Structure formats: C-alpha cells, structure tokens
Image (cartoon, grey):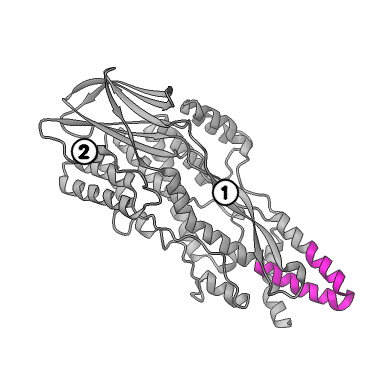
Amino acid sequence: MNKVQGKYRRPFILFSSFLFFISCAVNPKVYKEIDLAAGTGDFDAAVNVIVAGQESKKPIYSEKNAILLFLDKGFLEYYAKSYAKSSQSLQEAERLIEEAYTKSITAGFLSYILNDNTKDYPGEDFEDIYINIFNALNYYNRGDIDGALVEIRKLSSANGKLDLLAGKYNYKDPKTGASLEELAQKEAAGAQLPGGKKVEFNNSALARYLAALFYLADGNTENAQIEFDKLQTAFLTNKDIYSNPIPRAVELARNVPNEKTMLNFICFSGLSPVKVEEKITFFFPIFRNPALYVSNVKLPKMVQRPSKIDRIEAVINGKIKVNLELLENISAVVEETFAIRYANIAAKTYIRTLIKYVATDIAAAEVERNNGDLTAFLTALAVKKTFEATESADIRMSRYLPGKAYIGGILLDPGTYNVTVNFYSGNAIISKSEHNNFIVREKGLNLIDAVSLK
C-alpha cells in the first residue's frame, strides 16, 4: 500500500492544484453580438465586433484562445470578401494548430491527460481541414490559382492532412511507448477505456471538386481528371457523410465542350454544430471504498444548429435558373472527424479520474483505520463531489463554419452576365447574393461563391 501511495501522491497533488482552475472558454455572451451580425449577413460588422473586442481592456479571446480568434476572424473575413485579411488570419490559425500538435506529441503523460480547459486551445481536425479549403477560395478570389492549389494539396496530397487524420490520436507515451488503453489497464487492473467510433473520413469531395477546378484553370487536365475520380471515391467510401447523389455539376465540369465555357457556383449555407457539455457515467468497481464505484464526468458533445435554408438557386440575367445541389454536408464532416478526438478526450478523462480516485481511495483507507467505515465513506464522497464539481468539458471551437456546401454549373458563351444567388426557405427567398457584370471568360476558372449562415 505504501508503494502505491507514493506512486500516486505526486499526480494527486498535481491534479488538486487545478481544482479551482477557471475555464479558458470564451464567455458565450460575447458571441451574441457576433452571431447577430453574421446571421443577418453583415459580416463586416461581425469582424468589427471581434476587432473592437480584442482592443478593449478585457479582450474577447484570451491568449489561450488565440487559435479561436484567428479561426473566427478568418472565416468571417472570407464571408465579408476581405480575402487578403482572411488568408492572414487562417494562416496564423494553421500555424498555431501545427505548433500545438507538435507540443502534444512530446508532452509527458501527466501533462497530456490534464483537463483540456487548462491548456491552450489546440484546434479541431475539422477546423484544420476547412482552413485550407476556405483559404484556397481566398487565393482564387485574389486571382492566384497557384496559391489555391497549394492550399488544396495540403489536404489531398499523399500524407496530407486527410491521410494523417485517422492515426493522429493514437497516443504513445514518449518514455514507454504505451498506448492510453495499455496505461489504463496497467493502472486499474484491466480497466477498459470508453470506446470511440473509428474515423473513416479521409477524402473530402469539396476539396477534390475545388482541386479539379483549379487544375482545369491551370491547364492541367490530367490531374483534374484524377481529382474528379477521387471525388467519386469519396462518395463511395464515406456513406455516412455523402448520402446524397453526386451533383450533376461535377460531370458537367468534367466534360465541357470546346466551344463552350462553364460558370461554376459554390455556395455555403447554415452553421455547423457546436459543442455543449454533457454528463456521462464511469464505473470503477476496482476500488475499496464504495463511494468511488461510480463517477459522473463531463464531456463535450456536438449539437446541430438547424438551418432555415432548404434550397439554393442561381438566376442569370433574370431568366436562366440553375438549381444548386448538395456536395458536402460540412456538419456531418464535423461530427465524423470529432469522433476520434472524442474517444481521446474520454480516455484522458477516464485516466485522470482514475488517478484521482486511487489517491482518494488510499486516503479513505487511512481514515477508515482511524475513524471507521462511515467517516471514510463520507470523506471519499466529499472528495469525489469536489472533483466532479471542478471538472468541466472543453466546449471551445470555432462557431462560424457553414453547415453545407452546394455546387452548380451552367454552360455559357463567354460574356458579361448579371447573376443573383437566392437562398430559399420553402418558397421564400430569405437571403440573396448579387454578382452584377460578372465576366465569364473563355479560358480560366469562372466561379461564383456565396454564403448565407441563416
């Protein structure tokens, strides 16, 4: 018993020091003004709220939430058509995410399993993926196809972000090489960690579609055809995400007649899920004190944010109508890619709770010898309640990723056109995006992008 007690004394002291740690999460009230502006389509105002908030005496985003700052600001700047500023923000978010991941690889075990709320926000995988997609669109809108291709290749190339996603959270202790499950089994006499869903998302149809368009614009038809093939593979291998048919615009873009050119559309609607806190129960029948058999812990959970938009239509010169079709359910990608991180969070929470309870069980046994069973039970129960009260789920994430991506296309003669993109709820247009005097060129990429977060 003394050997075990010594083994867990230091971890117990370490975790106890965080009992009264204040969460790093951004106050939800701060988002109300940003949400209101973004919801009405006034993205400039939404960005201005963030900028003004950061210049105040109490910044909206703390230093520990720097990644959140650049993500939120970068996505909103893209919607506001501030493409250069958006690139700067998203690139800084990407740099900080890479830096945080590098630190996590070399972190010691105790540091690794600390409550995420005590650390700098590291970013989520889905955020890291869509950074490159939206930054590619930033480069396109700035007339830089090469830059757009560089961003997309970060996702789609061999050993790119999508290829590396599945193995990213297979934690190995730097000293022993043990996995989280092996560590838990060792410390808890065969305890099993909470299971998690295996992530199968490793191919984005949206990234493939944009890559194909950018390659076509660059004159690289061979690579474009490869990307179109991989887009079809994404639909075949990721049924949980791509339950919809492949949009007709894909085949149209793939086979544009020589005498025609194509006007392409990519539009985003709604908002992706956000995290909330939920309680789940862990069972620990291995302990001597019955007060420690059950633990209620808090973990993050994704909840959907329903969109009013159910149809998107482009109207050309007030006459020609193009119905856009769903290409990628971004909300489904968010939930799918969060699944593996959720298993990782649950595992760390399980082990963290286990270590605390081992120390408590040892202390309660000493109380039992001196003061009896009831006092020991009440002591263990009080300590457990304190642990549960001071643990909180990390619900930080960017709030301004759209929920869905739609595409469409039409063959046109080169020329100048007035284009309106209408976002419908039922039969009512609830948002629109005007693109007057849009020049459809014979060569290069003709792409209109629009967004409504309603």
Residue at x 52% of width, y 42% of height: 304
Distance of label 2 from label 1 (alpha carbons): 44 Å
Quarter of the rendering occupied by the N terminus: bottom right
Q: Earlier in the sequence, mark 2 or mark 1?
A: 1
Residue at x 80% of width, y 76% of height: 365
Residue occupied by mark 1 = 64
Does residue 58 appear left or right of residue 406 in this picture? right
Residue occupied by mark 2 = 253
Front-most of residues 432 and 91: 432
Q: Position of residue 274 (x, y in %)?
A: 54, 43
Can see residue 97? no
Residue 365 forms part of the magenta stretch: yes
The image shows residue 230, relative to residue 356, as above or below, that is above
Q: Position of residue 355 (x, y in %)?
A: 66, 69
Does residue 263 appear left or right of residue 235 in this picture? left
- Dot 1 falls on a residue whose secondary structure is helix
Q: Which residues are magenta?
A: 354-382
Q: Position of residue 94 (x, y in %)?
A: 42, 48
Q: Main secondary structure of the magenta part?
A: helix
**The disc labelled 2 sits on which kind of residue?**
Ala
**The disc labelled 1 sits on which kind of residue?**
Lys
Residue 314's quadrant in the figure? top left
Front-most of residues 439 and 229: 229
Front-most of residues 267 and 392: 267
Does residue 18 appear left or right of residue 219 in this picture? right
Residue at x 79% of width, y 72% of height: 364
Callout 1: few (<14), some (14-19), or many (20+) C-alpha neighbours within 10 Å?
Answer: some
Q: Position of residue 163 (x, y in %)?
A: 35, 58
**Outermost top residue:** 318
Callout 2: few (<14), some (14-19), or many (20+) C-alpha neighbours within 10 Å?
Answer: many
